[in-house]
Image (spheres, rainbow, N blue to C red):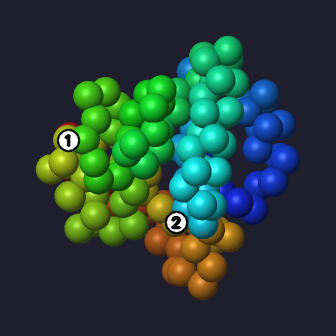
Amino acid sequence: MTDERMGDALWHALQRIPPGSGVVVRHYQTPPAQRRALALRIRRIAQARRLVVVARPGFAGIDGVHGAGRSASLRTWPAHDRREAMLGARAGADALFVSPIYPTRSHPGAPAIGPAAALRVARGLD
């Protein structure tokens, strides 16, 4: 999961994660044109390293979408509770990201749901 706080650590991480891994391009606070350029740079690295890239709809050359939107290929979905998990399942998501299981900087102050609740969120959706 990328976001603005990563800075140049993003490029280091993209070189370190194993081939076959996935990258969710978020950077939601970045202006759209800059976010698009960033996604394309990520995509070039990902292609060379055999990584999968998903982002919001509208990014050319990515492998799929994260969240609502049409995708002819891979679709991932954020699920912070059972309702969102069910929405993702109904939308045909290929994968759900259940979070936050543990405290995280991307959701400051949000309660962590813990591993047991994460299992309950996703149980029986397949």
Please identify the quadrant where the C terminus is shown: top left
Question: Which badge, 2 or 1, is on the more N-terminal residue?
Answer: 1
Q: Which circle marks residue 92 in the picture? A: 1
Three-letter amino acid code at the position of disc 2: Pro
* Vertical placement of residue 30 versus 23, above or below: below
- Residue at the location (68% across, 70% down)? 105
Residue shown at 36% from the left, 60% from the top: 79
**Which residue extends farthest bottom?**
109
**Can you identify the residue that label 2 sits on?**
100
Residue drawn at (21%, 58%), measured in percent from left and top? 87
The percent position of residue 109, horizontal first and vertical second, equals 60, 84
Relative to 42, say whether 125 is above or below: below
Closer to the camera, 8 or 90?
A: 8
Residue 97 position in % (x across, y down):
43, 51
Q: Is residue 123 visible?
A: no
Residue 88 placed where, x, y %?
25, 52
Which residue, as the protein is rendered here, is positioned at the far left?
90
Q: Residues within 10 Å of mark 1 (few under 14, many from 20)?
A: few
The picture places residue 11, in percent across and down from the top left corner, at: 79, 38
Q: Height in image: 17 above or below 9?
A: above
Q: Real-space Cα distance between discs 2 and 1?
A: 22 Å
Look at label 1 and name its amino acid: Gly
